[in-house]
Amino acid sequence: MKKVFTGVLALMMILSLAACAGTNGDQKVRVKCPACGYEFEAPTE
């Protein structure tokens, strides 16, 4: 049972790292101001 838990935990860690690495920083993010409704592109870091 301990090996199964360790395997599942390792798989979850690998998948979470793959999700972070798969994002592309070149994409523009559209943001909408909740107060006035103005939409703009957020600056990328």
Image (tube, helix red, strand yellow):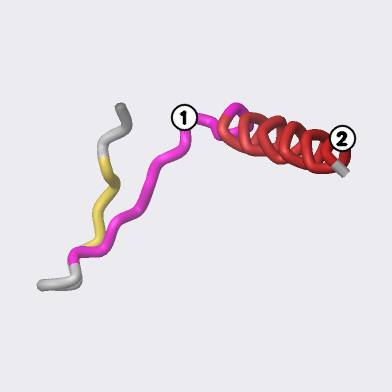
Q: CA distance from mark 1 to mark 2?
A: 40 Å
Q: Amino acid at mark 2?
A: Lys
Where residue 39 sits, quadrant-wise, is bottom left
Of circles 1 and 2, the one toward us is 2
Image location of residue 32, percent across then percent down: 26, 63
In this view, the residue in front, 3 or 37, is: 3
Name the residue beneath numbered marker 1.
26
Q: Quadrant of the N terminus?
A: top right
Q: Residue at x 29, y 47 (%)?
A: 41
Q: Residue at x 26, y 36 (%)?
A: 43
Image location of residue 36, percent across then percent down: 11, 72
Q: Quadrant of the C terminus?
A: top left
Determine crowd level at label 1: few under 14, some 14-19, many 20+ residues with C-alpha closer than 10 A: few
Q: Residue at x 60, y 27 (%)?
A: 21
Q: Amino acid at mark 1?
A: Asp
Q: Which residues are magenta?
A: 21-33
Q: Which type of secondary structure does the marked residue at label 1 adopt? A: loop
Secondary structure character of the magenta stretch overall: loop
Badge number at residue 3: 2
- The reply to whether callout 1 and callout 2 are in contact (CB within 8 Å) is no
